[in-house]
């Protein structure tokens, strides 16, 4: 089976460059090519939602030059990809604390979101300045505000209402979560949304992640049995 929602922690750009004696920025530049490939391939094989971790809230701590490089790359990527996103029916959505982004980046994201809003074939979600715990805190604040205004009672709060306060409110749960570069951690990515996702870790550094690498992750997913608490026999019987 094909996962409906694939999320990727795109890691290893810096090491890719360092291994070649290049500046880290070169790794990020090549990483942007991998993003293009992954988006195209996901769209071609029929993945409906692709969420990419492009920049975490903690990444603001990186050297100023690297942060600027990453922001420039993002704006360039959005400019260059816009025609293809429209042509291929891909809707772009950004999640994360966009008020922390430089104005030019925020404006570009919003322009591309608006121009691709009708895309019905795939949703591409870019997580920029994203941190899952902070997103959960915000959701809790929104729900608390509704309770304060008397719109709902604290005992009415359930998973659906809390999920409705997240920046991923309109997206389905993550089915497959991929992390490249051999690191085996989540780094704050989609803690609520991916809590029942199948996890796939690969040693491949992100700039080397090509169509075949995505296909391998999807093939691995297709061999998993998702039991959601049932026995293997029950799962088979349910089809
Ligand atoms: C991922 O690559 C890109 C971002 C986090 C923005 P890294 O830059 O983290 O690469 P490594 O982990 O240093 O190799
Ligand atoms: C996670 O990668 C964030 C992105 C891929 C954008 P990091 O490289 O920043 O994560 P840590 O610091 O190794 O956990
Ligand atoms: Mg890293």
Image (spheres, helix red, strand yellow):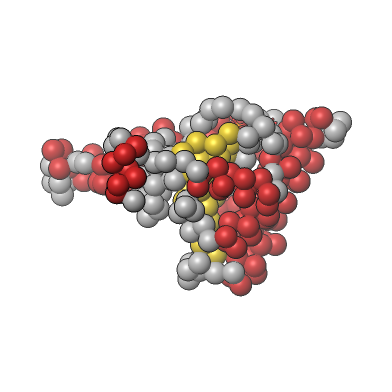
Q: Position of residue 110 (x, y in %)?
A: 52, 59
Q: Where is residue 238 in the image (x, y as percent from the top left)?
A: 29, 49
Q: How many marks?
A: 0
The residue shown at (59%, 69%) is: 88
The answer to whether residue 69 is seen in the rendering is: no
Q: Where is residue 43 in the image (x, y as percent from the top left)?
A: 57, 61
Q: Hey, which residue is sitting farthest top in the picture?
A: 184
For residue 91, side relative to residue 70 (left or right) = left
Q: Quadrant of residue 115?
A: bottom right
The residue shown at (55%, 42%) is: 220
Q: Reply above or below: 180 against 112.
A: above
Q: Reply above or below: 30 against 41.
A: above
Q: Is 116 in front, or is 88?
A: 88
Q: Where is residue 61 in the image (x, y as percent from the top left)?
A: 61, 29
Q: Reply above or below: 80 against 159.
A: below
Q: Is 185 in front, or is 73?
A: 185
The answer to whether residue 5 is seen in the rendering is: yes
Q: In which quarter of the image is residue 196?
A: top left
For residue 208, side relative to residue 96 (left or right) = right
The residue shown at (61%, 27%) is: 183
Q: Is 66 in front, or is 35?
A: 35
For residue 236, side relative to residue 19 (left or right) = left
For residue 181, side relative to residue 172 (left or right) = right
């Amino acid at each position: 089976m094909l996962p409906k929602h694939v999320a990727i922690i795109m890691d290893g750009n810096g090491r890719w460059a360092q291994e070649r004696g290049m500046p880290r920025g070169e790794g990020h530049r090549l990483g942007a090519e991998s993003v293009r490939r992954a988006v195209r391939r996901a769209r071609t094989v029929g993945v409906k939602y692709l969420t990419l971790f492009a920049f975490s809230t903690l990444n603001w701590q990186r050297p100023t030059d690297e942060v600027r490089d990453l922001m420039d790359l993002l704006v360039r990527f959005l400019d260059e990809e816009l025609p293809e996103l429209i042509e291929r029916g891909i809707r772009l959505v950004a999640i994360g604390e966009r008020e922390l982004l430089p104005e030019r980046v925020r404006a570009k994201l919003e322009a591309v979101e608006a121009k691709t809003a009708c895309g019905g074939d795939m949703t591409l979600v870019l997580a920029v300045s994203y941190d899952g715990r902070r997103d959960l805190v915000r959701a809790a604040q929104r729900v608390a505000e509704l309770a304060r205004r008397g719109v709902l009672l604290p005992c009415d709060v359930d998973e659906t209402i809390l999920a409705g306060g997240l920046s991923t409110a309109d997206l389905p749960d993550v089915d497959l979560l991929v992390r490249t570069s051999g690191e085996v951690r989540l780094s704050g990515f989609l803690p609520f949304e991916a809590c029942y996702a199948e996890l796939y870790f690969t040693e491949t550094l992100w700039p080397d992640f090509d169509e075949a690498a995505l296909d391998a992750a999807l093939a691995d997913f297709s061999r998993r049995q998702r039991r959601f608490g049932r026995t293997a026999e029950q799962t088979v019987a349910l089809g």
